[in-house]
Image (spheres, rainbow, N blue to C red):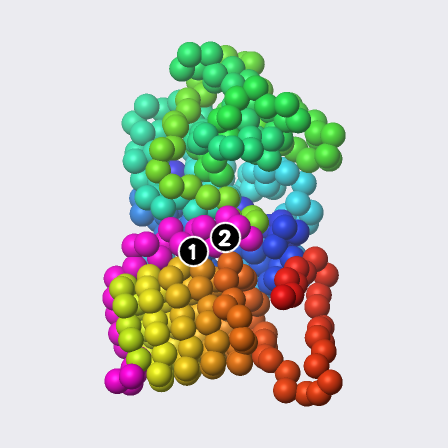
Amino acid sequence: MKGLILSGGKGTRLRPITHTGAKQLIPVANKPILYYVIEAVRDAGIDDIGIVVGDTEPEIREAVGDGSSFGVRVTYIRQAEPLGLAHAVKVSRGFLGDEPFVMFLGDNLILDGIKPLVDEFRREGPHCEILLARVPRPQEFGVAELDGDRVVRLVEKPKEPRSDLALVGVYMFDATVHEAIDAIRPSARGELEITDAIQQLIDRGRVVKHHLVTGWWKDTGKLEDLLEANRMVLTRAKRSMEGDVDAPSRVEGEVILGKGSVVRDSILRGPLVIGARCTIEHSYIGPFTAIHDDGTIRNSEIEHSIVLARCVIRDIPVRIEASLIGKEVRIQRSQLKPTAYRFMVGDSSLVDVL
């Protein structure tokens, strides 16, 4: 059985962060989302993985390499344009051959992994198995309609959903999916929809099973979902103090402090993670915060946030919370007079000012 991970797409809902980087490499608890996906596929007993890439291919290649650091083999498959999930399968046909495969969207997280689901697919041998979860806004997802225990209809992002069962970003197929994809045409939004391909399987009498996910799952395509993923992963953090903390500082709860990091006269209240070579001085770092390597925080407070590498936050008089801060960002209080706000802000940004 092979693995197919989709890491194309433009990440428009996470701009401006994704103007300069792949959304699948945004870190959750200081580890790129894509790494969790690769590990989940590997832990399900699959070591031959294709990664579908687009414009961010060089960045994905640099981060993942040949897969040996994960104990897998990685083949990169170019998708020139993000023309739908079924199109991604279509361009991957040479890699997949006629083998069954699991397709995993590279910005989705399933906290408990997928091994039991892959084992079930291997054991029972349906033509397709889909994962479903109940969601509050099904119109934002592909939606499944059931008749008892049978999947009868799938609709991509319906305006008026007929159920609250959303397709989770993990699918399992045998080779019959290829003939189903060949039979469909682009949707109104110009994409080959995987929901249409699965509907073809249903209409042709193929066996399409479903599994209701009751554990934690998240599509991390939006800021609030990314922060929720960060929070959930950090709930499993175990204290690890490899940096230096002085006597006046307080460390409470499950805190991970990386090598070479220094904490002076500050409060760290976990669960949280601080990467390597960070400097924390006269500050409060609150729960569910992830600060990546080489960051500096002085005279400031922050919680429930993700701070990427090499950021500087200084002398901020109000607590920062529920924020995603990109690489090499500097946030500081100006000492200049007359008092004024001064911004350099990219496209699609949000700035809240008191």
- Residue drawn at 56 percent across, 56 percent down: 23
Q: Are marks 1 and 2 in contact (CB under 8 Å)?
A: yes
Q: Which quadrant, please, contains the N terminus?
A: top left
Q: Which residue is mark 1?
A: 230
- Chain part drawn in magenta: 223-248
Q: Quadrant of residue 274?
A: bottom left
Q: CA distance from mark 1 to mark 2?
A: 6 Å
**How far across and how far down the image is residue 221, in percent?**
56, 48
Q: Position of residue 97 (x, y in %)?
A: 49, 37
Residue 145 visible to the viewer: yes
Residue in view at x 33 percent, y 61 percent = 271
Type of the residue with mark 1: Asn
Q: Which one is nearer the viewer's eye here, 215 or 284?
A: 284
Residue at 27% across / 64% down in the picture? 253
Reading the image, the residue beneath label 2 is 226
* Residue 112 x %, y %: 32, 44
- Answer whether residue 292 is magenta in the image: no
At 55% across and 53% down in the image, what residue appears?
223
Secondary structure of the residue carrying numbered label 2: helix
Inspect this view and state whether residue 174 appears: no
The kind of secondary structure element at disc 1 is helix
Q: How many marks?
A: 2
Amino acid identity at mark 2: Leu
Above-or-below relation of 248 to 183: below
